Image (cartoon, grey):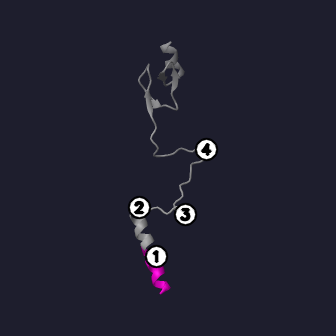
Amino acid sequence: MWLKVLIFAIAGVAIYRFFGGKIPLLDREEKPKEGEHDFGKVETTSECATCGTYMTENDALIYQKKAYCSTECLEKAK
């Protein structure tokens, strides 16, 4: 009796997981440590106002609401 219940429970969980179900205790998403990159994460890009190079907004230098890729391009714009 208990063996049948156990087998059906295991089969049910396997089918649930096969179709994309997540079990909170088993599927914990670990947050990346500081300094690690989140691969697959979409980052917003900006175009340099001087040379047209695209870079992520984290790498851009912002001056007077315009994005620049380097200090050289920033100096040319002044």
Q: Are marks 1 and 4 in contact (CB under 8 Å)?
A: no
Q: Amino acid at mark 1?
A: Ala
Q: Magenta segment: does it hold 72?
A: no
Q: Amino acid at mark 3?
A: Leu
- Looking at the picture, tell me which residue is in the foreground, 32 or 11: 11
- Looking at the picture, tell me which residue is in the foreground, 44 or 50: 44
Report the Cα–Cα distance between label 3 and label 2.
15 Å
Magenta-highlighted residues? 1-11
Residue 47: percent from the left, percent from the top?
A: 42, 26
The answer to whether residue 77 is above or below residue 6 is: above
Regarding mark 4 in the picture, which secondary structure is present there?
A: loop
Report the Cα–Cα distance between label 1 and label 3.
16 Å
User: Which residue is disc 3 drawn over?
Assistant: 25
> Which mark sits nearer the N-terminus, 1 or 3?
1
**Eye-nearest disc, 4 or 3:** 3
Question: Is residue 44 shown left or right of residue 28?
Answer: left
Residue 33: percent from the left, percent from the top?
A: 60, 47
> Which mark sits nearer the N-terminus, 4 or 2?
2
Q: Amino acid at mark 4?
A: Glu
- The residue positioned 44% from the left and 28% from the top of the image is 46
Q: Are marks 2 and 1 in contact (CB under 8 Å)?
A: no
User: Which residue is disc 4 drawn over?
Assistant: 34
User: Which residue is disc 2 drawn over?
Assistant: 20
Residue closest to the far bottom: 1
> Which mark sits nearer the N-terminus, 2 or 1?
1
User: Which residue is disc 1 drawn over?
Assistant: 9
